[in-house]
Amino acid sequence: MSPTETKTEKIDGWNRPPVIAPDGEGELLEVAMGPHHPSTHGVFRMDLALDGERVVRLKPVFGYLHRNHEKIAEQASYLASMPYTDRLDYICSLTNNWAYALAVEKLVAQQVPERAEYIRVILGELTRIQNHASSIGFLIQEMGASGTPLMYAFKEREKILDLFESLTGSRMMCNYMRFGGCRVDVSAAWLDATRKVVAGLPQFVDEFETLLSSNEILMARCQGVGILKPDLAVNAGVTGPMLRASGVDYDIRKVDRYGIYDRFKFRVPLGDHGDVYDRYMVRILEMRESIRIVEQALKEIPGGPIMDPKAKIRGFRPKPGEAYGRIEAPKGELGFYLISDGGPNPYRYRVRPPSLINLTVLEDMCLGSNVADVVLIFGSVDIVLGEVDR
Amino acid sequence: MNIERAALAPPLKIQQPRTTNHGSRTTISEDALLGEGILKGMAETAKNFFLSYVSKERLTTVEYPEQRIPTVEAARVFPFLVYDGVDWEAGLRCVACQICEKECPPKCIYIDKSKDKKPDYVGKQQFYPTRFDIDISVCMSCQICVEVCPFEAIKMDTEFELATDDRFGGLLYDRKQLARSNEYYHSIHPTEASEVDARLGEEKAKVEAKARAAAEAAAAKAAAPPAPPAGGGS
Amino acid sequence: MATSPLFTDLDQIFIILRNWLVGFLPAALRPATGIVLEVIAIVCVFPGLFALTTVFERKGLGRIQNRLGPNRVGPYGLFQPIADGIKAIIKEDIVPFSANAVVHFLAPLSLVVAVFMEFAVLPMGRNMVLVDLDAGLLFFFSMSVSTELSVFMAGWSSRNKYSLLGAMRAVAQMISYEVVLLLSSVSVVMIAGSLSLPKIVDAQNSYTGIFPHWYIFTPWGLAGFVMYAIAATAETNRSPFDLPEGESELVAGYHTEYSGFKFALFFLGEYLAMFSISGLGTTLFLGGWSAPFSFLTFVPSWIWFFSKVMMSIFVFIWMRGTLPRLRQDQLMNFAWKFCLPYTLLNLIVTALWHFMGEGWMRWVVCTAILVAVYVFMGRVEMRSEHFGPRRYRYAE
């Protein structure tokens, strides 16, 4: 389709976004934004075609960070892939570990003891909180507030990362979940430290909101920008806060009820408009819900083993079969699809990366908006290139 | 490059979710003044500015390298080999079973097994590694080598200021550079090291008890009157 | 105000110093040398303040963000501008091959010269104005508009379509807010009755009880000051109006093709423009060099002037640390659809104030009009641009 034609097609009553024709005889300005760019969250390129200030065409180009994760997993054992999953969405390593552990546990029908499930929930929700805080911080940083909300978010994130370090040994590449439980038990001292950190989190979210949510400039920049309609979102496979901001009620923690999520009381916030402001607010409200979940889990955590005593560690050879395990990662639905042929390595190992699938609708959201808004919309999708490129 | 969207199946009908307004929140009240949000935000930053002179909570900079955050006990950076006693070669716990080499995800461990044997901490004859190299520029600190080692021979160090300007081998550590004493292990991971020592002590006690029992049985047998030869001696 | 001779001397110390230095020369040369000395003083003091401001900005932003600013170079990092200056001077001066070299060279110079001229009419203390022009305010604004020319020269001479776009956007923004700036100063001229800046300060230099007669303490003065402050932020391209020089935008700004010392000159020009516009705002609305309470008049007048200017700079830094940027079209929208009508209304209210005569009645009426219109226009603005507070719901 050449950019000089205007085409609006209706397919079965569902509108494809129109290709906007440039008015006047001016030619289109073709610009590549990235891969070296302060606001592309990593090495990512967007080939924009601009008509004046409006975006006429946008083609994302990625693959700059491809590291052969899935191929390496075919040659490494199941356990050896676990540290590699840390490095997929490198900000949220514990949820990556959990999704992979879930997939393998489904493959071999492995049970997980209760205490390990509680620990997994606590760590997963803490990961969600620090991911949403950083994501909002980066979004506002791109809007030009010279990094003030980013620094506040990172101050809280440091506390959570210190907790991770004292438990797993590493701040970001945690490598903590195992097939059948967790690697190391939590101590009472760690639980106390967690309670203290979580007690300070509601005040942080309140301060964050005072600074940001009612700021008129933020509202003017974010409301009405980058609208994603719910039917497009569902049909493109978008998941996570982006989907819920468009108004679709789909949270895998409520749908699949994996782990022990059915024991916790939490709500799922929804947006009405599907614009950048809704995605920002949904993340803030989800942070508050995550704080509630962690508080409940910290109260109810039982004693017991953290690893199923019947779990096989050395000589792990699952029977031939396949399994798909998915969780509600902070960015969306993170799934691992494993096919085993009876050997120590998987026959096929496939990651369903939420960031990549959420990126497929980037063009639809950006058409017709300003260049300055493209940066904002891209930030609101909240991607991590490690996951997009694997 | 133009990507044509493939013709899709009829789109899903999205059901309107049942929602409740119970607990819904507005960001600010609907009759707020223009500019009120901005002023609230500026009050927030002013609060942070003035409090940063007073409270430690609001000024979180640690001026490295003059000030350092103490490392936690569980921290893991790169592996090292534990040896008991004073002589690192004689006391090295590693028996070159090569399990860590096989399990290492990025395959950064290189082991050569010896031809002869030397006694380990309980006196049993074991192989030992003539070469044990770890390429720390490849190592990803995942700790799987520590988890799978059956002999408590390899543990994680916490030293991270290891930058070097030697491009060709400065980051390839051989077994002499990797060997550290058990006392050092106690100093960086006290709880873990005590547990390991307790377990190894138990093992040693069991082996010694068995040896003593065998010795007593042999002594008892030797002290008993010699049995009549029955077609062949003992 | 009767003050002891010591404090009067302290107040006039720079005048005394100048007269003493000039006294060494024959009478024919004295006026010229006096002016030259004053010019040298201005050229030394304000760039020195600029150097200090760069450090304070970085440290201030750092403290707002709960971190330390630069603190390695010198005590508390105060020698940082020396390090930055050395870096700017020794950097290679790159001129693009196809650029128009003459215009490229002249653009930063014309910016700095125009901004320095603005300081010539600011009264920095009692009797401390370089040139007492009858139309001082007019001169100030004509110099301020010349800076826009240099911005355009920079963008055009670089032969880079992104720089040109950035320059055009910057000039459009500056022109729109220049109108608001001018109109908000016209209210002051209406009441003070003169365009000469020392006379405007004199009109504010009286006290009822302990409270001064600064124009900011009147309803039209407060509204005018708020509009002036917004326009001043936009004129000097500071956050939240700094889209022309935003680094996370595609169009990199009119000074992309400048490196080394010329870039440092642009930087200097921008900060000096901040000082001079704050100086003018202080003179027009905050009483210039007059003391805030009548019992504080013993403190030298130039101390008051400079502290008020530095406080304005602090507010600039505070806003930069807090607020995200506005998009270009939103910026222009805001100027023409909100600021300009409100400033025109302010003119009418000022006239009403003048003609209603003394008494409490004019306070009540003027305040009521200004507040009501502000609230109404705020609602209209938010509704027409489709932004505002929202409700959020939870799934069942």
Image (cartoon, rainbow, N blue to C red):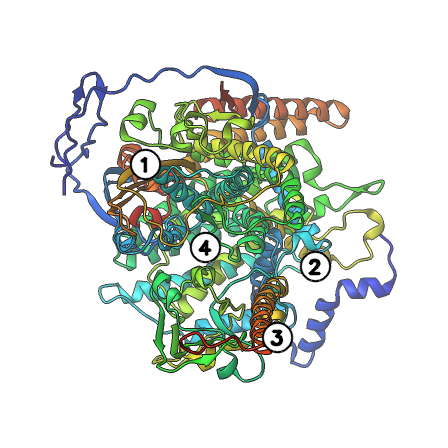
As helix, strand or loop, the secondary structure at mark 3 comes to helix
- What crowding class fits label 4: few (fewer than 14 Cα within 10 Å), some (14-19), or many (20 or more)? many
Q: Nearer the viewer, residue C227 or A245?
A: A245
Give the label, 3 or 1, closer to the camera. Answer: 3
Where is mark 4, residue-wise?
Answer: A173
Residue B39 visible in the shown view: no
Mark 3–mark 1 CB contact (< 8 Å): no
Tell me whether marks 4 and 3 sit on the same chain: no
Q: Amino acid at mark 1?
A: Tyr
A103 or A99: nearer the eye?
A103
**Residue tagged 3:** B183
Q: Nearer the viewer, mark 4 or mark 3?
A: 3
Relative vertical location of residue A30 with respect to residue A237 in this rendering, above or below: below
The residues tagged by marks 4 and 3 sit, at their Cα atoms, a distance apart of 28 Å
Question: Do the dots labelled 2 and 4 sit on one chain?
Answer: no
Q: Tell me the quarter of the picture where residue C37 sits.
A: bottom right
Question: How would you rate the neighbour count of disc 2 (Cα within 10 Å): few for under 14, some for 14-19, many for 20 or more?
Answer: some
Say what amino acid the circle numbered 3 marks.
Glu
Q: Which residue is mark 1?
A: A324
Question: Label for residue C127?
Answer: 2
**Residue C303's image quarter?**
bottom right
